[in-house]
Amino acid sequence: MLAERIEFLERPWWVLTARYPDGDKARTVFERLARLNTGYELGVYRHGPPSEPGCFITIVSHKRNGMSVAERVMFQLGAKRTMLAAEEPGMVEAFIARRIRVMAASEESDPGEPHKRIIRRGTRGAILHVDGTLDERIGGG
């Protein structure tokens, strides 16, 4: 398995990031991963710096079994594995914190459903902070 195991809040988490040649290829894989993500409890995030918007996908999970399934889908269309923790310090923890917030909100709203929520952003996206909160951008789709 390619996913990196890290400890966060005294619990193991698995993280995997891939870089795509362009945002369209990343979007295609992101949509495939969203369809796959039934019961695996994966946090799937498409992101990137302003110079490469949407060219990265990061998956985080506290359950190892879904990561190996996601890897097979993730490394398509010219994707290259990248070490997010080294390239963007603090981002791994931010994605895990975001995943914890989504899981907690899901549990509160419907305890019988898996921790899955599909969140679509407009073309301008949102800004993720290190504590897992988002600043929504207004306008732009």
Image: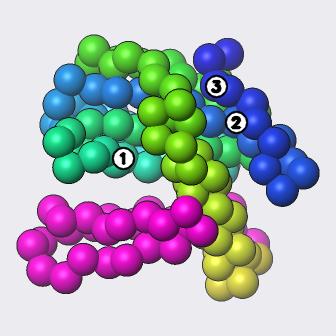
Mark 3 in CB contact with mark 1 (< 8 angstroms): no
- SS type, badge 1: strand
- Residue 50, can we see it? yes
Residue 99 in the image: state x and y as whole percent: 62, 60
Image: 73 above or below 62: above
Q: How is the image coloured?
A: rainbow
Q: Which residue is mark 2?
A: 14
- Along the polypeptide, which appears first: circle 2 or circle 3? 3
- Residue 98, can we see it? no
Image: 135 above or below 18: below
Q: Nearer the viewer, residue 69 or 92?
A: 92
The amino acid type of the residue labelled 3 equals: Ala
The amino acid type of the residue labelled 2 equals: Trp
Q: Which residue is mark 3?
A: 3
The amino acid type of the residue labelled 1 equals: Arg
Mark 2 in CB contact with mark 3 (< 8 angstroms): yes
Residue 93 in the image: state x and y as whole percent: 63, 52
- Along the polypeptide, which appears first: circle 3 or circle 1? 3
In three-dimensional space, the C-alpha distance between marks 2 and 3, rounded to whole angstroms, equals 6 Å
- SS type, badge 3: loop
- SS type, badge 2: strand
- Along the polypeptide, which appears first: circle 1 or circle 2? 2
Q: Which residue is mark 1?
A: 46
Magenta region's main secondary structure?
Answer: loop
Residue 86 in the image: state x and y as whole percent: 53, 31
Is 42 a magenta residue? Answer: no
Q: Nearer the viewer, residue 131 or 47?
A: 131
Which span is picked out in magenta?
Answer: 112-141
* Residue at figure coordinates x 26%, y 37% from the top left: 55
The quadrant where residue 1 appears: top right
